[in-house]
Image (cartoon, helix red, strand yellow):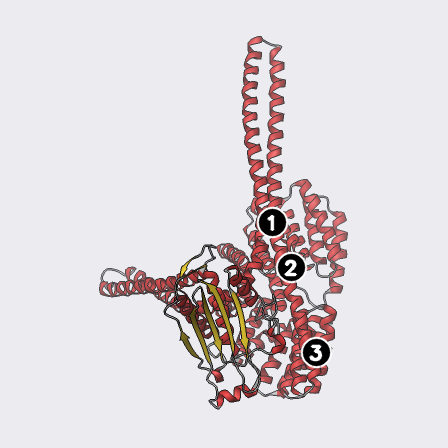
Amino acid sequence: MNRYIFIFKFLLLFSLSVFSSASGSLAQTSKVDSLLIGLEKLGDDSLKVNQYVELGRELLGSDVKRAIFYLDEAIELGTKINYKKGLGNAYNSKGRASATQGNFPEGILHFQEALKHFHDINDKTGEANILSNLGSIYFMMGNSTKALELHFESLKISEQLDNKLRIGTSFNNIGTVYQKNRSTMNEALTFFKKSLEVFKGINMVQGMATASMNIGEIYFIESKYDSAIYFHQLALELSDGTLDAAFPLTQLGEIYASLGNFQKAFGFHRRALDVAEKLDAKFELTQVLIGLAKTQRKQEDFEAAIITLERAKLIAKEIDAKDELVEVYLNLSEIQASIGDYKAAYENEINAKTVREEIAKTSTEKMIQQLRFESELDKKEAQIELLQKNTELKNAAVFNQRIIIFASLGGLLMFVIISISLFRNNLSKQKANRLLQVQKEEIHAQREKVESAFDQLKSAQAQLIQSEKMASLGELTAGVAHEIQNPLNFVNNFSEVSSELIDEIELERAKSQEKRSETLVSEILKDVKSNLEKIAHHGKRADAIVKGMLAHSRPSTGEKEPTDINALCEEYLRLSSHGIQAKDKSFNGELFPIAIATEFDSSLPKVNIIPQNIGRVLLNMMNNAFQAFGNTDSQSYKDRIRNAEIKPTVTVSTKNLGNRIEITIKDNGPGIPDAIRDKIFQPFFTTKPTGQGTGLGLSLSYDIVKAHGGEIRVESKSGEGLTGTAFTITLPS
């Protein structure tokens, strides 16, 4: 089940403090009417501001436009009387309204305005709340780094205030950001457990339920079913009777289906359906139906699973839940393929791919929108500074005029006073002129800053294209980078142990001299020193790994240099082999190990090339050669390997042709079909599944070799008895 939208919901509920129940609409209407009646009786403007804010908050869950109207009234009146506390609350609620409508840039502006007002009155609780809200918005915009920075800043303030509710909220939100990445699941679990403990301490039921669901979700992903059942049962007890119960009920149904207890699984699924249908919660109903269909599929009731998924598909289309729609199409495709309806399975596979492309396009558009928004934000900040400078200049001009008036009045008394006044006026004018010159220079600098921001936006768009070109090298780097985790784990472990040892020293030193054991203190200090040496050792290990990776990912200088082609081929063959295995150690296990052979011509001269660019070409070709053995669906080819008729081998050879040199990367894989052989160098053409290839690798390789005055040709054999592909690169020597 796709959990990110569900996670966003809880993250916003906590961060923005919007808690509601299914049966609250009538009570809400009554409260709105009561607030409107009370508003007419208020005489104090600051109380009216608070009443407008309360009206806006009350209407956020039912009538956003009306809520914004009352919040604007609060802002107008609050600005008039300079009531910063009310303005901070009004902008905070207006930011929540923008977030509810999906207008995140506008929400950020409102929250920043609220933060400024809370900062002016030193309201730390208000600042912590706004920082958490900003973190939630940046997370939904895809900027996890900025989101973590803001959530940790909010946590720091909350801990200084010892505000348990805000501390628990920050722990939950930090865990939510970490949960987005599979590599940081352990960190997410740690923060969710901290959040649960804090909410238990203050008996915050909704907080305990949310933290329990998040913990159960992680254990479910990791197939730790006993722990997942425990925490989802806890969440269910805390949220039973509310819409939030739909998720743990669905998860419990899927878990028990995985354990083979279908009777119990369907019991939980029925309860989840009742909750979602009773409250007319279409998004939750879509997820509940997907979970039910998975259980029906595990029971091999394919007909019922298809009916359930068709219902989920209609609702997902209605509410534009694209992630859920992809999951529906994929499940339908797999079920229909298993029952032999290959046409329908293929159609649903195509539908899933189409929706995925829409999601990817939307994601790219959001990234560009965020870059534009940040550029516009810089422009607005520059404009604000310009307005402030203009105000200062106007104030200086008014001051000069006053001096002139006072000097003229003084002239009626005596000539000496007039002379002194004129002298002072002259000095003031000079000062004003100097100030004006400084302001002009600052205005010019701000204008350059705005232009620089626009250039950075264009540069960022160019980098999006460059990132496609670096896809293969980035993939290799990501595969190798996991080796950094071992030294970092040592550093973390020895740091934690050293901290505990220092605590023991402090406890021992706190004892009286008679009871203190200096021998024990000395031994502990030796252990601390030993730990520090180990930390330094493993830190250097991590540093060496990072420097090694950076050396292979550094951008090209564009300058050619004499290069040993044999050494270059050997280096990138080793990197490709290690990178493929690091990315997936179980890669096509039945076909491995793959043999590696080299046939290097020792008479090869050094060739004048750009090493990084030709290295990327070699890496791309070698990766394709290794992956050829894992991307085949040919059963006859696999049978020939099992029968030892073919031994999977990648061969790299070089040859001196006099005025040219030749590099060949060859595999004895299943070959390239004739139908697509002429298309492989076309930009964006790929046979890999969506998300696993850009289709630019061979196109960019072709361009790089052409830029060096060389050529690439491909020879491939496919079919019964004929296997293998060879890419040959020729370069002028």
**Residue 263 position in % (x across, y down):** 63, 88
Marks 1 and 3, Cα distance to the nearest angstrom?
42 Å
Can residue 508 be seen? Answer: yes
Residue at the location (69% across, 52% down)?
53
Q: Is residue 229 above or below residue 466?
A: below
Q: Say what secondary structure mark 1 lies in.
A: helix
Return the mark for residue 347.
3
Of callouts 1 and 3, which one flags the residue occurring earlier in the amino acid sequence? 3
Query: Which quarter of the figure is the C terminus placed in?
Result: bottom left
Q: Nearer the viewer, residue 170 or 318?
A: 318
- On the image, numbered disc 2 is attached to which residue? 365
**Residue 345 position in % (x across, y down):** 68, 81
Q: Say what secondary structure mark 3 lies in.
A: helix
Marks 2 and 3, Cα distance to the nearest angstrom?
27 Å
Horizontally, residue 333 falls left or right of residue 224, namely: right
Label 1, residues with CA under 10 Å away: few <14, some 14-19, many ≥20? many
Task: Tell me the kind of residue under disc 3.
Answer: Glu
**Residue 559 position in % (x across, y down):** 45, 54
Task: Tell me the kind of residue under disc 1.
Answer: Ser
Q: Nearer the viewer, residue 193 or 692?
A: 692
- On the image, numbered disc 1 is attached to which residue? 375
Of callouts 1 and 2, which one flags the residue occurring earlier in the amino acid sequence? 2
Q: Nearer the viewer, residue 314 or 255?
A: 314
Residue at the location (75% across, 55% down)?
65
Query: Which quarter of the figure is the N terminus placed in?
Result: bottom right
Identify the image quadrant of residue 452. Answer: top right
Q: Is residue 245 above or below residue 425?
A: below
Task: Tell me the kind of residue under disc 2.
Answer: Glu
Horizontally, residue 48 falls left or right of residue 223, namely: right
Marks 1 and 2, Cα distance to the nearest angstrom?
15 Å
Return the mark for residue 99.
none
